Image: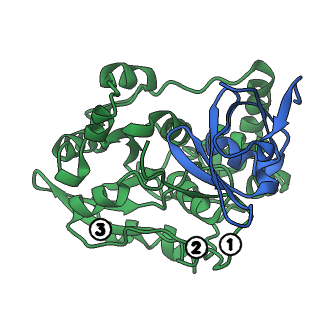
Amino acid sequence: MPSPGSVPLHLLPPGAAAKVVGMEAGGPKRRRLLDLGFVPGAVVEVVRRSPFGDPTAYAIKGSVIALRREDAAGILVRGDV
Amino acid sequence: MASDGLFRTGPRAASGSHPVVALAGNPNTGKSTVFNALTGLAQHTGNWPGKTVRTAWGTARHRGRLYTLVDLPGTYSLLAGSAEEEVASDFLCHGRPDATVVVADATALERNLNLVLQVLEVTGKVVVLLNLIDEARRKGYDIDVGVLAEGLGVPVVPAVARDGRGLPELMDTVAALCDGSLVTHPRPVVYPPDVEESLRRLEARLAGRLPRGAPLRWLAVRALCGDARVLRLLAGPAPPPGSPAPAGPAPPPGSPLPSPGFSPVVRPRPAVSRTSPETKRSAGP
């Protein structure tokens, strides 16, 4: 569910941190992202972006996960934590 | 790869009458370190694109008894439908291990509990191995093992598999699960009422299509997640009333379940990148 002030994760710059507030991805991709720890309330930090801008490494729940832009775009985050 | 080879004549046939113990866990939790320490085998310790997904198995000896250990592919989930997850899920559902060890990384417990809870929906004969407990302490995590075991309803054994610490205690627990002297009472995951109602209805429909002892609730959960194979099973004809399969006696513990219309399929992992996000372990906190 989009909530006020939420942005898709792929728009966050490296170094930024935010809280997961929703998921627009569906089907197996949604399941996969949830299993990787992108659940509502989880804090995600943008670690670094690869030289060509894709994929991007995100720190979440003690691991660093690399997501493609299209996958990160399905995750809604909000604000600084 | 013939699924029958993996699930029917694989570990079960190799084990003779030894109890079969499955090892499950997230990637990079030290699962294969545990496997190698217990079996003395130099088995594979990696999992990368292009490598065929399969289970490795070996024999462990503990207090004069032999156990067949099955090293399942490392997964974050049993539900998302990747080849690894299907292998792990199918073995737990149809391979009917006598005990299952879920290796969890104590430094990232929250992430690891996802798989622990999913495994507990398939089988209750589980022991959680809380590995890397030394690293967790160095990071300042103080995990109350008793509270964790109480909350999950299954035993939890802290360990440093690299040094072999905790592994004798693990095998004592596994032995007790296998011989029935330890009975677990896993706390079921309770879903919202509408989901529970759907699960109940799906379980009732699945019960007529599967032998007794099949993990109906877990298969119902998979159906709700859109698992194509469970949906096919549900769409197929129901057996006539009074047919022997569901009414018959429960198969002996550990015997492989026949699965009419639901034979496990094992696909080699594609060599090229997949559609799901790729993951790697962080080098530091």
Q: Name the subunit of mark 3.
A: B
Which mark sits nearer the N-terminus, 3 or 1? 3
Is residue B132 found left or right of A78 in the rendered image?
A: left
> Which numbered dot is residue B49?
2
Which chain does blue denote in the image?
A: A
Up-down relation of residue B200 to residue B225 (above or below): above
Q: Which quadrant would the C terminus of chain B be assigned to in this image? A: top left
Instruction: Give the residue number, with chain letter if any, for mark 3.
Output: B58
Residue A64, position as x, y percentages in the image = 55, 49
Is residue B268 found left or right of B239 in the rendered image?
A: left
Q: CA distance from mark 2 to mark 1?
A: 7 Å
Is residue A80 found left or right of B130 in the rendered image?
A: right
In the rendered structure, are the residues bearing label 3 and label 1 in contact, judged by CB atoms less than 8 Å apart?
Answer: no
Residues behind callouts 2 and 1 on a single chain: yes
* Chain B colour as displayed: green
Specify the quadrant of the image occupied by residue B137: top left
What's the amino acid at mark 2? Pro
Q: Name the subunit of mark 2.
A: B
Circle 2: element type: loop
Residue B203, position as x, y percentages in the image = 71, 37
Is residue A50 found left or right of B228 in the rendered image?
A: left
Q: Is residue B174 visible?
A: yes
Q: Is residue B249 visible?
A: no
In the rendered structure, are the residues bearing label 2 and label 1 in contact, judged by CB atoms less than 8 Å apart?
Answer: yes
Q: CA distance from mark 3 to mark 1?
A: 30 Å
> Which numbered dot is residue B125?
none
Residue A73, position as x, y percentages in the image = 82, 47
Instruction: Please give the name of the residue rendered at 64% of the width and 69% of the height, measured from the top-left corner.
Output: B265
Nearer to me, A20 or B164: A20
Instruction: Give the residue number, with chain letter if any, for mark 1.
Output: B273
Residue A17, position as x, y percentages in the image = 66, 34
